[in-house]
Image (cartoon, rainbow, N blue to C red):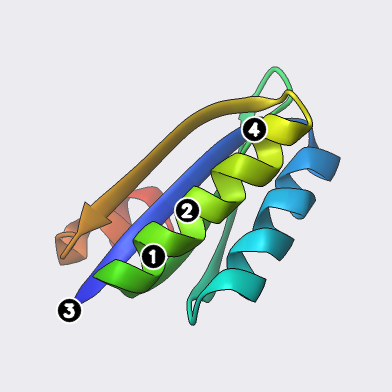
């Protein structure tokens, strides 16, 4: 079962720290990043639901240590059109 995980931070350096933690914590794939304006960066990963949840938790913790965590979310079994619509 696939899932899509997102961690949104303020600033690129915090996003990279978050991504590093996610990739080191669980077997997830890096999908990409979206810059959503005002310095916000959303990092996207995918993989099995449990792995994505663990990775997002680790990424959120890393971003929170830097004081720049804005949002986290995991979508289990995302619709195919979701990826197409958002270009991820």
Tags 1 and 2 in contact by the CB under 8 Å rule?
yes
Q: Which residue occupies the extreme right position in the image?
A: 13
Q: Where is residue 33 in the image (x, y as percent from the top left)?
A: 61, 53
For label 2, the SS is: helix
- Quick one: 66 or 13, which is closer to the camera? 66
Label 1 with label 4: CB-CB less than 8 Å: no
The reply to whether residue 16 is visible in this rendering is yes
The relative height of residue 38 versus residue 72 in the rendered view (above or below) is: above
Q: How far is disc 3 from disc 1 in space, using C-alphas? A: 11 Å
| Residue at 51%, 75% in the rendered image | 26
- Label 4 packing within 10 angstroms: few (<14), some (14-19), many (20+): many
- Work out whether mark 1 precedes mark 4 in sequence or the reverse, and give the earlier one: 4
Label 3 or label 2, whichever comes before in sequence order: 3
Is residue 16 shown above or below 9? below
Q: Mark 4 points at which residue?
A: 9
Q: What element carries label 1?
A: helix
Residues at circles 3 and 2 in contact by the CB criterion of under 8 Å: no
Of pointers 4 and 2, the one earlier in the residue sequence: 4
The reply to whether discs 3 and 4 touch (Cβ–Cβ < 8 Å) is no
Please name whichever residue, 84 or 30, is drawn nearer the observer in this view of the structure.
30
- Crowding at mark 2 (Cα within 10 Å: few <14, some 14-19, many 20+): many
The disc, 3 or 1, on the residue closer to the chain's N-terminal end is 3
Would residue 42 be seen by someone viewing this image from the given angle? no
Give residue 79's quadrant in the image.
bottom left
- For label 1, the residue is 52
Residue drawn where x is 49% and y is 82% of the image? 27
Residue 56 in the image, given as x and y percentages of width and height: 47, 53
**Disc number for residue 56:** 2
The answer for how far apart the CA atoms under marks 3 and 4 are is 26 Å
Give the image location of residue 28, x and y in percent: 48, 76
Kindly report which numbered mark, 4 or 2, lies closer to the viewer in this rendering.
Answer: 2
Q: Would you say 18 lies left or right of 84 here?
A: right
């Amino acid at each position: 079962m696939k899932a899509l995980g997102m961690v949104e931070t303020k600033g690129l350096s915090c996003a990279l720290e978050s991504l590093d933690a996610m990739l080191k914590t669980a077997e997830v794939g890096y999908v990409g990043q979206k810059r959503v304006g005002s310095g916000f960066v959303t990092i996207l990963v995918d993989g099995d639901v449990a792995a994505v949840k663990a990775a997002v938790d680790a990424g959120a913790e890393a971003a929170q240590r830097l004081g720049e965590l804005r949002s986290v979310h995991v979508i289990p079994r995302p619709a195919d059109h979701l990826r197409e619509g958002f270009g991820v």
